Image (tube, rainbow, N blue to C red):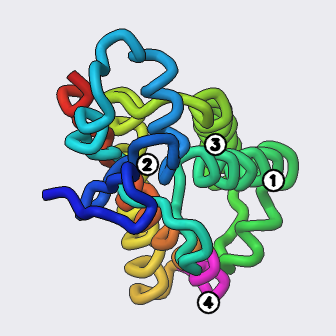
Amino acid sequence: MHQRHDSGDRREHRSRGFAVAGRKCCRHAAVYLRNNRSRIRRPTQMARMRCPYGKRGQGDGVMSLSYRHLAIASSGICFFLALIWLVVPQLLLWVWQIDASHSALLMARRGGALFLGLGVILWRTRHADPSPARSATAYGLSVSCGILATLGASEFMTGHAGPGIWLAVAVEYTLAACFWAVRQAPNIDQFK
């Protein structure tokens, strides 16, 4: 299960996970070691534990998607949309080629309030540790963005919205996929 390296006493878990004996492969390993130093009796215990975030190699050229970065970007999008829907809802209705009737403006402003609330939730949870609540937030946003994108595409197909709706559909499908990718909280029992 362990692989011996040229440096002698340094062992590394073969699959994904933490490296031991002073070599950090993951910033989460250092935090776990610092907080649970009394529970770890020997370095090989650390090698048997798996990092819930996967292997974080340096210079491997792969960009990892984190909940923190996604929450910051999404909260910015939500704040921007809230501002537009609350202040000038006619703009997006014009882009989507939808008639700006009084009922459409009423619903647009109410939607702006929802976007403002979502932006605050995302901004406040950007530093949240992996937990069931953070997973529920990611699941919920993935589902709602996916449904919004599907509705936008179907409204275009039926002729109720213009081609400008495809910008919203692309952003919503992208957000749905990204939140789906970061939805899973690590199993807390792995660290016991």
Residue 25 drawn at (x, y percent):
48, 53
Amino acid under disc 3: Phe
Magenta residues span 161-167
Helix, strand or loop at mark 3 = helix
Is residue 175 visible from the viewing direction of this image? Answer: no
Q: Is tag 3's residue or tag 1's residue first in the polypeptide sequence?
A: 1
Residue carrying label 1: 84
Residue 52, quarter of the rendered image: top left
Task: Pick the quarter of the image with the C terminus.
Answer: top left
Amino acid under disc 4: Pro
Q: Residue at x 54, y 77 (%)?
A: 60
Amino acid under disc 2: Leu
Q: Residues within 10 Å of mark 1 (few under 14, many from 20)?
A: some
What is the spatial separation of the Cα atoms under label 3 and label 4, in whole angstroms? 23 Å
Q: Residue at x 60, y 79 (%)?
A: 165
What is the spatial separation of the Cα atoms under label 2 and label 4, in whole angstroms? 24 Å
Residue carrying label 4: 163
Residue 15, quarter of the rendered image: bottom left
Residue carrying label 3: 115
Q: Residues within 10 Å of mark 2 (few under 14, many from 20)?
A: many
Amino acid under disc 1: Ile
Helix, strand or loop at mark 1 = helix
What is the spatial separation of the Cα atoms under label 3 and label 1, in whole angstroms? 10 Å
Q: Is tag 1's residue or tag 4's residue first in the polypeptide sequence?
A: 1
Helix, strand or loop at mark 2 = helix
What is the spatial separation of the Cα atoms under label 1 and label 4, in whole angstroms? 19 Å
Whether pointer 2 and pointer 1 mark residues with C-beta atoms closer than 8 Å, the reply is no
What is the spatial separation of the Cα atoms under label 2 and label 1, in whole angstroms? 20 Å
Q: Can you tell which of label 2 and label 1 is closer to the viewer? A: 2
Q: Is tag 2's residue or tag 1's residue first in the polypeptide sequence?
A: 1
Residue carrying label 2: 141
